[in-house]
Amino acid sequence: MKYISTRGGMAPQAFTDILLEGLAPDGGLAVPETLPQISADTLESWRGLSYADLAFEVLSTFATDIPADDLRRLTHAAYREGVFSTADIVPLRPLDGGLQLLGLSEGPTLAFKDMAMQFLGQVFEYVLTQRGATLNILGATSGDTGSAAEYALRGKRGVSVFMLSPHGRMSAFQRAQMYSLQDENIHNIAVRGVFDEAQDIVKSLAGDLQFKTQYRLGAVNSINWARIAAQVVYYFHGWLRATTGRGQQVSFAVPSGNFGNILSGHIARSMGLPVRRLVLATNENNVLEEFFRTGIYRPRGAEHTYATSSPSMDISRASNFERFVFDLVGRDPQRIKALWADLARDGHFDLSSLKPAFESQYGFVAGTSTHDDRLSVIRTTHEATGVLIDPHTADGVKVAREHVEPGVPMLVLETALPAKFSETIEAALGKRVEPPAPLADLESLPQRVEVMDCDAQLVRRYIEAHAKV
Ligand SMILES: *Cc1c(COP(=O)(O)O)cnc(C)c1O
């Protein structure tokens, strides 16, 4: 399996070659040259596999340049009890009204980012060791991604993490989660500023090519192909658990922001998994819902990106969307370049002529959920089932209910646990939710964080003094 760019300007590359890269050199995103096809017989033969063995089967179709024994070792190291809180890794639980909950948040940071990041940590260490190379991951976070990266890369050979966060602007739980890590290769830097300013520092340092090369800076952002590939696994797992025989259809509802999670569902479906609908749920930042309703993609600026009570979906420029549009326009890189040129010039592009295909060919439908919807869904789901869901998952449940069909299981992806967002849970139910028992003392652990002014020079000097060389 080789990878090409959505903009057509990259010679085909192997999985481990694109692994450590961000954007393709031509500004596009890496995608498989052709997608592997999984037959109904193969799918049936996967029933009963453990999550780690299923991950091996699915990922071996993408990472064809990693020897099978090595890959199996990596998926077993990533997806095991101890790292995840259940032997199932991804439990499936019934909700009311024909819905089921696919539990993607049993990892160390209680959000679905762990599903991909735990595999990424294993495969990064493997490739760096093989090449005798080192890497310094530089990123900025407002919560979920940074902590998932730190938990996946802590103690790994050959790699350090420098994670910027906005000082005093994350929840006490989120701060404790990141800053309590004592591993020497994890560096938390709290800058006195907001998230966008931290992000600007990352951009300016990573944009300094000389500095970037000298200190071997890398990233683990949401466009990383290995993350997308690792997420494909749980769509197969969900289908295998929710069906009993070949050809049965299942729908998935996905709380969405950067279009990474649901893109993995699109890929699973394109590989032959019998998926009926991919239900895209947004919060008040509904750029993607607008696209699926109208065919017009119009990202919004920071001033029109609202801070909501499902904050991990407060995104108005979905970084993985280009990979889906590539398929939509018949995998034509010239069309992609033209569309993104329209976007740069006009602030939008128009694919309304393809609108009929969104659902009939690709299974996509979409809907929006608001703060009031979120609170009411958390409350009614709790009353009806006793199950407590987080605000992002509630957005998924709200939109899933609008698209559920008789006889077709609807699996809502649980993208975080409620303990991470206890303020909103309290607003919905009038009572707080405690973190899982192993994390009860998290906020009283000693914390390790470097606080500094929001100044790229200070961050640069810190990296120079602490980077792996
Ligand atoms: C990242 C995240 C999302 C959005 O996922 P995308 O892949 O960006 O669409 C939804 N919910 C939670 C809790 C997240 O952390």
Image: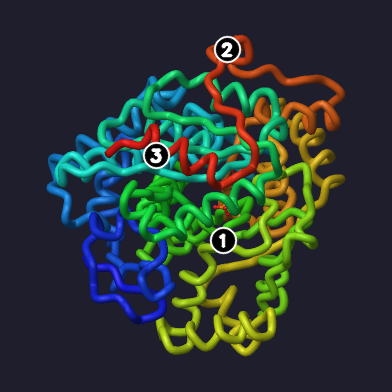
> Where is residue 331 drawn, in percent x and y?
40, 81
The image position of residue 247, as x and y in percent, is 40, 60
**312 vs 267: above or below:** above
- Amino acid tagged 1: Leu
Label 1 or label 2, whichever lies nearer to me, is 2
Mark 3 secondary-structure assignment = helix
- Number of marks present in the image shown: 3
Question: In terms of image quadrants, where is residue 287?
Answer: bottom right
Q: Mark 1 sits on what residue? A: 278
- For disc 2, the neighbor class at 10 Å (few under 14, some 14 to 19, many from 20) is few
Dot 2 beta carbon under 8 Å from ligand 1: no
Give the alpha-carbon distance from disc 2 to disc 3, as whole Å: 39 Å
Callout 1 secondary element: strand
Q: Quadrant of the C terminus?
A: top left
- Tell me the residue at 33%/33% (across/down): 78
Q: Residue at x 38, y 50 (%)?
A: 218
Residue ID for mark 2 = 437
CB within 8 Å, label 1 to label 2: no
Compared across the picture, whether 153 is left or right of 195 comes to left
> Which is nearer the eye, 39 or 343?
343
> Between tags 2 and 3, which lies in front?
3
**Dot placed on the residue nearer the N-terminal end, 1 or 2:** 1
- Write the residue at 56% across / 85% down: 341
